[in-house]
Image (spheres, rainbow, N blue to C red):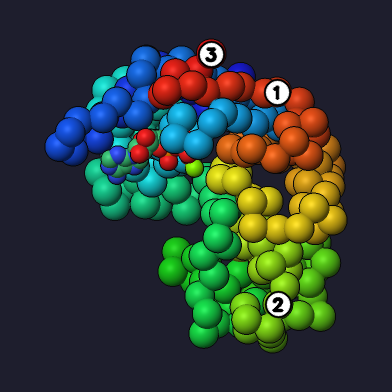
Amino acid sequence: MTTVLEFHQVSKQFPGPPEFNALTNINFALKPGDFAAITGPSGSGKTTFLNVASGLDHTTSGRIVIAGQEIGPMSETDLCLFRRRHIGFIFQSFNLFPTLTALENVEFTALVRGDSKKTTRERALIELERVGLKDKASNLPHQLSGGQQQRVAIARALAMQPKIVFADEPTANLDSKTARELIQLFQELNSNCGLTFLFSTHDMLIVESVKQIYRMKDGELI
Ligand SMILES: Nc1ncnc2c1ncn2[C@@H]1O[C@H](COP(=O)(O)OP(=O)(O)O)[C@@H](O)[C@H]1O
Ligand SMILES: [Mg+2]
C-alpha cells in the first residue's frame, strides 16, 4: 500500500445558519511512516480536517480513503468498527474517563471492541510501559499530571494497534518540558515502530520536529 490516508477534493460545510465552509476542495495524502503536522491560525480548519480524516465527522463532498478503504459509503456501525481497528485519536484535552484507572482507560476501547480480557490486559500493560507509566497503572486521571494523562491517552490509542494516529494540538495543555518529552515519544514511535502521525498544532516544538508540514488558511491547504 502506498498511502495510509487520501483526501480527494474534500469539502466540509457546517449548515449553520449561517453556512460556513470549513474545508474547501482539499487534496492530501500521507504515506506509511509519515510524521506530519497541519499548522495555521486558530479557526483555519485544523480540527475539522482531523475530525473528517478520522471519520469522527462527515464530509460534505469529496472522498477520503484510509488504509485503502473509502470511508464515505460505510454505515455508522461499519465506520465505528473501522475506526477502532485502524485509527488512533489523541485529543488536546486528553478525554480520559475520570472514574477509570489509567490501565482501565487504556483497556476500555479494546474491551468495547470485544477483545478478550486477558489479551487486552496484556497489551494495555505493554503500552503503559512503552509510554513510561506502568507504575501508575492503578492511578485515576486526577492523580496524574497533564503530561502523564496525555501519555495514558497515547497508550490507549496504541493499544488498538492503529495504522495512523491523529493528534489534535496534543501539547496545547502542557508545559514546554513535558511537551518536549511527549514529542520525543511520538518520534520514537514513528522511527522505531513506523507508526504514521498527523498532528494539528501551533506549537513550534512540533513544527520543528515533524518530517512534513502543511499550512492551512481559511479552510484551504496553502
Ligand atoms: N459545528 C460547527 N458549526 C459551525 N461552524 C463550525 C463548527 N465547528 C467549527 N466551525 C467553524 O469552522 C472553522 C474551523 O474550525 P476548526 O476546525 O475548529 O479550526 P482550528 O482547529 O484550526 O482552530 C471555524 O471558523 C469554526 O468557527
Ligand atoms: Mg482546533
- Residue type at tag 3: Ile
Which is more N-terminal, label 2 or label 1? 2
Quarter location, residue 148: bottom right
Q: Which residue is mark 3?
A: 222
Whether the residues at callouts 2 and 3 have beta carbons within 8 Å, the answer is no
| Structural distance between the alpha carbons of marks 1 and 2 | 32 Å
Q: Amino acid at mark 1?
A: Gln
Residue, x 56% and y 45% (percent of image)? 168
Q: Residue 100, image x and y in percent? A: 55, 82
Which numbered disc flags the more N-terminal residue, 2 or 3?
Answer: 2
Q: CA distance from mark 3 to mark 1?
A: 14 Å
Give the quadrant of the N terminus.
top right
Q: Which image quadrant is residue 188 in?
A: top right
State the mark number for residue 102.
Answer: none
Please name the residue that numbered disc 2 is placed on: 144
* Disc number placed over residue 212 in the picture, else none: 1
Q: Is residue 50 above or below residue 219?
A: below
Question: Which one is closest to the eye, mark 3 or mark 1?
Answer: 3
